[in-house]
Amino acid sequence: MTATESNNVSLTRRIIRALALAALLAVAVGFLVFGMNSQDTGKRDFVEYWAAGKLLVGGQNPYDSASILQLERQAGSTRAEAQVSFSPPVALLFALPLGYMNARWGAVFWMLAIVLSLVASIQILKSLYLSKDDRIHQLGYLFAPVFACLMVGQLDLFFLLVLALFLKFHAERPFLAGLVLFPLATKPHLFLPFTLVLLACSIYRREFRVLIGGMCGLAASLMVIFAIDPRAWSQYFHTLRTVQPMHLFIPTWSVQLRAFIDPTAAWLQFIPEAGCCIWALWYFWTRRNRWSWAEHGAAVLLVSVVCAVYAWFYDEVIVLPAIFATLKRREETGGSLIPFGIIALPALLEVMWRVDLADVFYLWTTPAWLAWYVYVMAASTPSANDRVAAERVE
């Protein structure tokens, strides 16, 4: 086959894939528009963002529980209490477009956005970690936290896309890599160790374009929200004082630690994350001359979720880069993926059987992902004797 014929075949395959993706999206749109009823809309976490967007566009308090409950019930929610987002005002940027739609079309737009974010994230992660012709990346679509995100309509898949873009651009386009990071401020408790390492890495390498990009993105988002709702931050802090989310039960190990020692001592819940921050800085410093965001940065995200002050099962989608790092190692060494399947399948079944996401049965998943990562990386790391032997050969 000549080079021209090879290029034509490659182009034909790209066209076929593009048409297949377009057809798939068309089917998805049809399903969402004609298959989604008001009850489906009201049951999804999406409804909290839609209600906040409606209030924001209408010049009202997007954190007002009474107004949110009224809108959520109009959307089909049967909850006794309002489902209020505890994310800071940066999250209102995601809610803003929804304020111009009714609940049904808002749900369609939201679901398509998170599905496209998932597809884009998987493709970027595949290009970063796996060979071009490998199909093992499709396991990412079956990752249980991904299913949970899609089922409840959470925005964590946007975070996954942000992280994937950062990993793709941080070396060649550092300002752009930093610029796209501002959505992570929506859930700062999940990304604090990652942020500290990013700061330490920038200082050590005297390369500040990522930080400048991040600050520019965050400043721009805050100015947009301030222009729309100058009282957003005061309204947010008032909601935190009123609702006190730290007193809610969440299936995380930090909550379990607090419950075991003293349920009334909220500060105990911060100990694991504080320890994670210290560990992350140590982890970076001991690897500073060979630091890899694709491998080491992914590990920091993984440990961050294990130690998070406040996290749900669907938040675990941000460990997907770490999972892809293990798939890369398995691809290089030819190791078995059966142990990963033994972990991933029960988690997927839990989601498919609709086990309540607030149930303690999800506590095991974060240590399981961490155990898998440590097992794969340790098993594929050359021993000290092997390294010495290699050096002698060289």
Image (cartoon, rainbow, N blue to C red):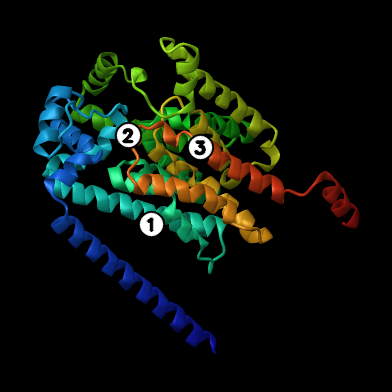
Q: Amino acid at mark 1?
A: Val
Q: Nearer the viewer, residue 394 or 202?
A: 394
Q: CA distance from mark 2 to mark 1?
A: 27 Å
Counting from the top left corner in percent of width and height, residue 359 is at 38, 32
Query: What residue do we see at 15% from left, 39% from top?
Result: 99
Counting from the top left corner in percent of width and height, residue 364 is at 50, 36
Secondary structure, mark 1, is helix
Give the mark nearest the N terminus, 2 or 3: 2
For label 1, the crowd category at 10 Å Cα-Cα, with few meaning under 14, some 14 to 19 and many 20 or more, is: some
Q: Of tags 3 and 1, which is closer to the observer?
A: 3
Give the mark nearest the N terminus, 3 or 1: 1
> Looking at the rendered structure, which numbered label has been put on residue 366?
3
Query: What residue do we see at 63% from left, 57% from top?
Result: 330
Q: Which residue is mark 2?
A: 220
For label 3, the crowd category at 10 Å Cα-Cα, with few meaning under 14, some 14 to 19 and many 20 or more, is: many
Above or below residue 9? Residue 225 is: above
Q: Amino acid at mark 3?
A: Thr
Residue 170 visible in the picture: no
Residue 126 horizontal side relative to residue 243, left or right: right
Counting from the top left corner in percent of width and height, residue 379 is at 70, 48
Q: Which residue is mark 1?
A: 119
